[in-house]
Image (cartoon, rainbow, N blue to C red):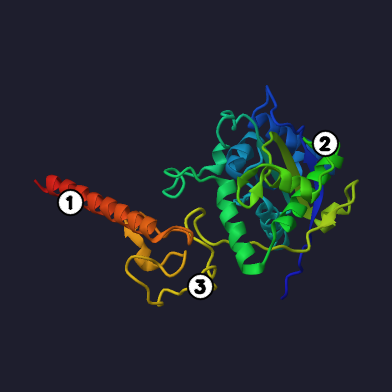
Amino acid sequence: MTRKRKPAVIAGVYNTVQARRLPGETSRTLLLDAVAGVLADAGVPLAAVDGLSAGGESAGLIYDLGLGPCWQGSQFGVSMVLEAAAAIETGQVDTVLIAAADAGTYTDRAATAPWTRPENEFVVPWGLFTAAEFALVARRHMITYGTTSEQLATVAATIRNNGHANPAAVYVGRGPFTAADVLASRMVADPFHLLDCSMTAEGGCALLLTTAERAADLPRPSIQVLGGGADHFGPSYRFPPPGTTAAVPAPWSTARSADEPSSGHCTPADYTATTSTSWSCTTPSRSRSSASWRRSVSVARERAARSSRTAASRSTAATR
């Protein structure tokens, strides 16, 4: 027997107060405010909720609200909505409350926000942060598809103008902005200018999803979730998306001299082992001179050799 599909709908939505900083608030107080607000907006009692998705706060919030046992989500951002909708449509749950909030996390304003600096070998030693990491992605997109800085700036200007016109937005009344305004702002990480980048803020938000059948009895109109999609390329900040090297000139099989690459792109020979688990690409940009390239290779080889000698010395000492 074919099971009848249960369409998922968004029955409630709520934003807490939003600001660059919210003194006196914590992530938990904002989260509870968002929960109470979305239930009131949808006209649904807490007792009717049998599923919750709040990131790392899910388990604790389920217990504190007295909801358990209930369905628990595990996704983040837009994927939380897709996950909840799929769970509703497959009969795992009937009403899911999605909530998120943050306050007091970004306190050291002299540095980039902590969530933009994940701790791994390609970030910590070099100071890479989100804007710079996505700048590399943007440049790859520009090379592959011909995307221009003006097109990126048009997107940023449109988003900022939405905030300019929204009375509840942090930057209400700060516009309007044009693509030219975005391009005239200072460069942060080429090709991204200051106004290309998102600002940090504190606040909370929540959504309530339920079945279309249940939503028909609620006082406010609902919005059906028709579908969505998401994909992942593996660990962030470590590997390029699959296929991004397909159009790279000078393939690895191309013959070249031992001292200088035939292009500005990395090849297997351009990687030198610095430790047993970390690799360093020493390929210079095309504008570097041959002498500069040779110096880079020499320094990289010396560092690799020094690392190998140190590792061998430690190994010898450990076996004594």
Q: Quadrant of residue 138?
A: bottom right
Nearest the viewer among 174 and 210 is 174
Give the image location of residue 54, x and y in percent.
64, 43
Q: Is residue 214 above or below residue 99?
A: below
Residue at 78%, 63% in the rendered image: 226
Mark found first going from the N terminus, 2 or 1: 2
Q: Quadrant of the C terminus?
A: top left
Question: Can see residue 211?
Answer: yes
Q: Quadrant of residue 61?
A: top right
Q: Quadrant of residue 172?
A: top right
Disc 2: CA contacts within 10 A as few (<14), some (14-19) or many (>=20)? some
In this rendering, would 266 be left or right of 79? left
Residue at 47%, 64% in the rendered image: 264
Identify the element where label 2 is drawn.
loop
Find disc 3 in the rendering and name its residue.
249
Q: CA distance from mark 3 to mark 2?
A: 46 Å
Find disc 1 in the rendering and name its residue.
312
Mark found first going from the N terminus, 3 or 2: 2
Residue 115: assigned label: none
Residue 172: assigned label: 2
Question: Can see residue 49?
Answer: no
What amino acid is found at the position of numbered circle 2 in the picture? Val
Identify the element where label 1 is drawn.
helix
Q: Is residue 126 above or below residue 305?
A: above
Give the image location of residue 184, x and y in percent.
73, 45
Give the image location of residue 134, x and y in percent.
59, 53
In this rendering, would 207 be left or right of 114? right
Nearest the viewer among 264 and 125 is 264
What amino acid is found at the position of numbered circle 1 in the picture? Ala
The number of numbered discs placed on residues in the rendered structure image is 3
Give the image location of residue 3, x and y in percent.
73, 70
Nearest the viewer among 203 and 86 is 203
